[in-house]
Image (spheres, rainbow, N blue to C red):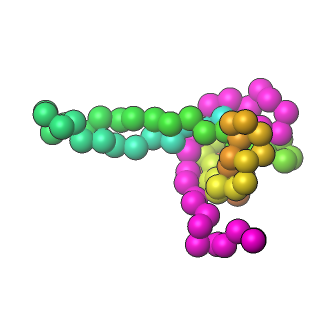
Amino acid sequence: MSENKENLRTTTGRVVSNKMDKTITISVERLVKHPVYKKYIKRSTKLMAHDANNECQEGDLVAVTSSRPLSKNKKWLLVEVLHRPNK
């Protein structure tokens, strides 16, 4: 009944909000080819992830992995902060 490592999905994204307690919102961008014009368009998906130590700031590039549902919308866990922009 334990979750296998093969079933875990890992993705990277940019933190767009950290206003909640122990929760961050990240934006994951992807390129999609337009069916008629064949031009690549940026599309984004917002994911909510669990940040146990409240260590992320807005603008950070982070890696997250899938997990069991932690709340209604939160189904991802923070793995690591990949890059912090200098402010």
Residue 43 image point, x, y percent: 39, 35
| Side (left or right) of 5 relative to 70 | left
| Side (left or right) of 41 relative to 23 | left
Q: Given the current orientation, which residue lies at the most extreme front position?
A: 1
As for residue 5 lying within the magenta part, the answer is: yes
Callout count: 0
| Residue 48 image-quadrant placement | top right
Task: Tell which of 69 and 77 is nearer to you.
Answer: 69
Residue 71 image point, x, y percent: 77, 39
Residue visible at 61% across and 64% down? 8
Position of the N terminus, as image quadrant, is bottom right
Residue visible at 66% across and 73% down? 4
Residue 47 image point, x, y percent: 61, 39
Res 67 seen here: yes
As for residue 45 lying within the magenta part, the answer is: no
Residue visible at 21% across and 36% down? 34
| Side (left or right) of 67 relative to 40 | right
Task: Tell which of 67 and 22 is nearer to you.
Answer: 67
Residue 27 image point, x, y percent: 55, 37
Residue visible at 80% across and 29% down? 20
Please report the bounds of the magenta region as a residue range.
1-23
Q: Is residue 5 above or below residue 20?
A: below
Task: Tell which of 15 and 74 is nearer to you.
Answer: 74
Q: Is residue 38 above or below residue 8?
A: above
| Residue 56 image-quadrant placement | top right
Res 87 seen here: no
